[in-house]
Image: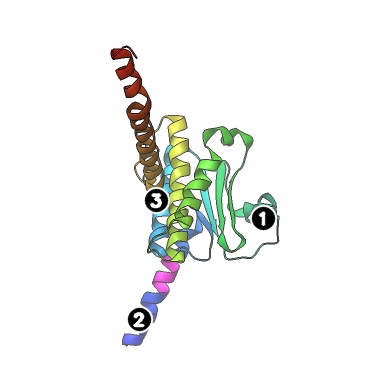
């Protein structure tokens, strides 16, 4: 009896996850349950508020060198509704793609920023496992994409996640900027003022 309950629960969990991921996550080779929830929450909010479908593809495939991601995406087109933007992450092939359904969508976001949000997570040195980094990277990429489109449309998102990596980089740049000004003040400007003051 207990075994049957366990199997029933496992089956229900599988069905739930399949339904959960069926709309926005087109391929799932490594996305965890928790990451899938976050991705779908952000994607659903993007659909409701921004009127744009955000699809995610996570794959462990080993693509051929210089494989065209536009061609790769065509095999999923029957499961996609326009307008859409697809976030593709294939770490084994070292490929990251952000592909829109039309050129009109490109002006709404910065593709390089979205990719950087993902790549920076994977490249970071921390205690997270590689699989965890892949999941965080996808969540961060989808979140960054939704935030940029929302900013373009002047709409506030509630489900997106702040890009901590970008914030750290901004803080670091600020520190470098302030440090540079301080060095200039100590070694150039202040001595110059003193010389002028003493008529030298």
**CA–CA distance in space, label 1 to label 3:** 25 Å
Q: Quick check: marks 1 and 2 in contact, CB under 8 Å?
A: no
Q: Quick check: marks 1 and 3 in contact, CB under 8 Å?
A: no
Q: Tell whether 69 sits left or right of 157.
A: right
Which numbered marker is on residue 170? Answer: none
Secondary element at tag 3: helix
The answer to which of marks 1 and 2 sits earlier in the sequence is 2
Q: Quick check: marks 3 and 2 in contact, CB under 8 Å?
A: no
Question: In this figure, what is the number of numbered marks?
Answer: 3
Name above or below for residue 15 compared with residue 186: below
Write down the residue under mark 1: 72
**Disc nearest the viewer among 1 and 3:** 1
**Disc nearest the viewer among 3 and 2:** 3
The magenta segment? 11-17
**Disc nearest the viewer among 1 and 2:** 1
Name above or below for residue 182 compared with residue 62: above
Crowd around label 2: few <14 · some 14–19 · many ≥20 (10 Å)? few
Choose top left, top right, bottom left or bottom right for residue 4. bottom left
Q: Residue at x 40, y 71 (%)?
A: 12
Q: Residue at x 48, y 38 (%)?
A: 51
- Find residue 94 and report its horizontal and vertical position in percent: 59, 58
Secondary element at tag 1: helix
Write down the residue under mark 3: 41
Write down the residue under mark 2: 6
Q: Nearer the viewer, residue 136 or 125?
A: 125
């Amino acid at each position: 009896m207990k075994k049957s309950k366990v199997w029933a629960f496992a089956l229900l969990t599988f069905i739930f996850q399949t339904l959960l991921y069926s709309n926005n996550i087109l391929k799932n080779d490594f996305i965890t349950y928790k990451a899938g929830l976050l991705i779908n929450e952000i994607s659903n909010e993007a659909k409701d508020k921004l009127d744009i479908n955000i699809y995610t593809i996570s794959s462990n495939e080993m693509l051929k060198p210089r494989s065209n991601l536009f061609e790769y995406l065509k095999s999923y087109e029957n499961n996609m509704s326009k307008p859409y933007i697809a976030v593709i992450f294939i770490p084994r092939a070292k490929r990251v793609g952000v592909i829109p359904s039309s050129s009109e969508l490109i002006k709404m976001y910065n593709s390089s920023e979205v990719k950087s949000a993902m790549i920076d997570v994977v490249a970071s040195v921390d205690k997270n496992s590689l699989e965890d980094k892949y999941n965080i990277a996808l969540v961060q990429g989808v979140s960054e994409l939704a935030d940029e489109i929302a900013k373009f449309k002047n709409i506030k998102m509630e489900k997106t996640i702040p890009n901590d990596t970008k914030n750290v980089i901004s803080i670091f740049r600020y520190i470098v900027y302030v440090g540079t000004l301080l060095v200039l003040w100590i070694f150039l400007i202040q001595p110059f003022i003193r010389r002028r003051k003493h008529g030298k």
